[in-house]
Structures are given as structure tokens and as C-alpha cells.
Amino acid sequence: KSLNLRAFDEKTRHAVYARQQGICPVCKKHYEFHEMEADHRIPWHKGGKTNADNCDMLCMADNRAKGGK
């Protein structure tokens, strides 16, 4: 089994969701957990770590619009 270093684990995603109280930091709207995706604040391809300090939970629309910018 290969380890995916880019993917946030379930525990981290739930902790960040709780920290944000379900609010997307981009559009400021509330979403249920399953409506959000974990995003690296500092992109992984630019050296960003896959940990809670470098994670935001974004709504799917905002995360997919953001891309790897």
C-alpha cells in the first residue's frame, strides 16, 4: 500500500472543519462536512506540509475554482 503524502487524513479534516465551525474561508458560507474539501494553504507542490496548520476546509466550488495557484 502506497502512502499518499498529499491527502489529509480523516482526523485532520474533521479537526479543521471544527476549528472553522463549518465556514468556508473563501465565501464565508456554512457547509456540512461532506460538502467541503481539504486544501493546502501553502500548496503541496511549493513545499506545503500535509498537516492541520497548513489546512483549510473549502467548499467544493471554491476549492475547485482555486486550483494550484
Image (spheres, rainbow, N blue to C red):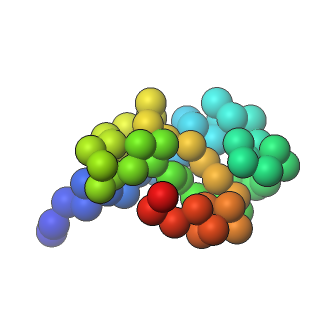
Q: Is residue 66 left or right of residue 40?
A: right
What's the residue at 25%, 61% (across, down)?
Answer: 4
Where in the figure is residue 18, as x and y percent of width and height? Answer: 66, 35
The quadrant in which residue 17 appears is top right
What's the residue at 79%, 50% (across, down)?
Answer: 27
Where in the figure is residue 41, as x and y percent of width and height? Answer: 48, 42
Q: Is residue 28 left or right of residue 64?
A: right
Where in the figure is residue 58, as x and y percent of width and height? Answer: 64, 53
Q: Is residue 6 visible?
A: yes
The quadrant in which residue 54 appears is top left
Q: Judge by depth and name the residue closer to the eye, 61 or 9.
A: 61
Q: Is residue 22 visible?
A: no
What's the residue at 70%, 68% (across, down)?
Answer: 61
What's the residue at 52%, 53% (across, down)?
Answer: 38
Q: Judge by depth and name the residue closer to the eye, 44 or 59.
A: 44
- Indicate whether 1 appears above or below 28: below
Q: Residue furthest left?
A: 1
Where in the figure is residue 50, as x and y percent of width and height? Answer: 34, 44
Image quadrant where one finds the N terminus? bottom left
Q: Is residue 33 left or right of residue 47?
A: right
The quadrant in which residue 53 appears is top left
Total marks shown come to 0
Q: Residue furthest front?
A: 69
